[in-house]
Image (tube, rainbow, N blue to C red):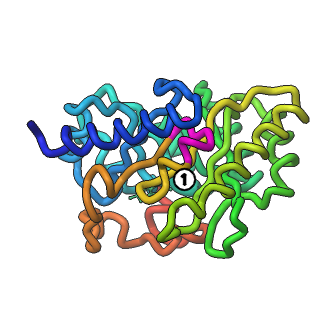
Amino acid sequence: MRPLDGILADVEARIAAACAASGRKRDGVRIVAVTKTHGPETVREAMECGLRTIGENKVQEAAWKIPLCPSGAEWHLIGRLQRNKVRHALALFSRFHAVDSIPVLEKIAAVADELGVSPAVMLEVNVSGERTKGGFAPGDVPAAVEKALSLPRIVLDGFMTMAPFEPEPEKTRPVFAGLRELRDAMEAEFGASFPELSMGMTNDYEIAVQEGATLVRLGTVLFGERPKARPQRAVDAGDAGESGEGGGAWDRIID
Ligand SMILES: *Cc1c(COP(=O)(O)O)cnc(C)c1O
């Protein structure tokens, strides 16, 4: 048995237990296997174990990795998307978990319209209010939803959040419940359906599932601690723009 098989069996059992505890069906929860910093062989191993939904947090990293991976995976961008990387990202990913500004929504719509694609989009919400976290403040979400619904091509179907790291995962529960309640309020306000909730990582996915997560983003629990020195270092040496606009040479090349 491959090592990942055993790990996955344990994760599956925990997800099943969390579903049972909250009266949910197991098939309402999908694992997004987060392969950031790991190479194509890790993606291959995940796919051999039946995982088909793969998450990356950087457009640059995905750009070199995806062509080296087996086909048949569904690639999700789980990290923040910058305006100047939208065109490239739309060629790589079918779902965006962490859209966090109206200019980015507008850019996705414009480029998607040009390309004739209809990406699935989720808005990241900073439910915890932690200053280091990305996402819309909860109070800004209605305007963002209204904007997303008015744009062509954008298939807005849910929301994403990250809870603060808690040594006691139970403490993350209000964050996940908060995102679910915000989703319910948006469905009522806009008469729309937003079925997807992307929440829960290695430390807190069982709590997130109990609170309604449909996409759990799992890295460390599946693939171990991430290496500190990233293998793609040389590729994104011009990566100063990751947290701002137009920093590296790469940013200018791709759009
Ligand atoms: C890295 C990452 C994850 C996975 O985190 P683990 O704790 O390793 O499971 C989930 N979501 C996002 C946005 C990430 O960047």
Q: Is 52 on the left-hand or right-hand side of 145?
A: left
Q: Please tell me which residue is depicted at 54% across the width and 42% down the height of the picture.
A: 209
Label count reads 1
Where is the N terminus found, in terms of image quarters?
top left
Quadrant observed for ligand 1 in the rendered image: bottom left
In the current view of this chain or complex, which residue is farthest to the left? 1
Callout 1: helix, strand or loop? Answer: helix
Decide which of 230, 178 is in the foreground and name it: 178
Q: Is 20 on the left-hand or right-hand side of 197?
A: left
Q: Is 90 on the left-hand or right-hand side of 148?
A: left
Q: Name the residue under label 1.
A: 85
Residue 24 image offset from top left, x and y in percent: 56, 28
Q: Please tell me which residue is depicted at 49% across the width and 56% down the height of the picture.
A: 204
Q: Does the magenta stretch include residue 212?
A: yes
Q: Please tell me which residue is depicted at 62% across the width and 34% down the height of the picture.
A: 196
Q: What residue type is labelled 1?
A: Lys
Decide which of 178, 194 is in the foreground and name it: 178
Q: Does the magenta stretch include residue 43?
A: no
In the current view of this chain or complex, which residue is farthest to the front? 21
Residue 153 image offset from top left, x and y in percent: 69, 29
Residue 36 image offset from top left, x and y in percent: 35, 55
Instruction: Specify whether residue 154 is in view.
Output: no
Question: Which residues, given as a range, are shown in magenta?
Answer: 208-215
Residue 222 image offset from top left, x and y in percent: 29, 49
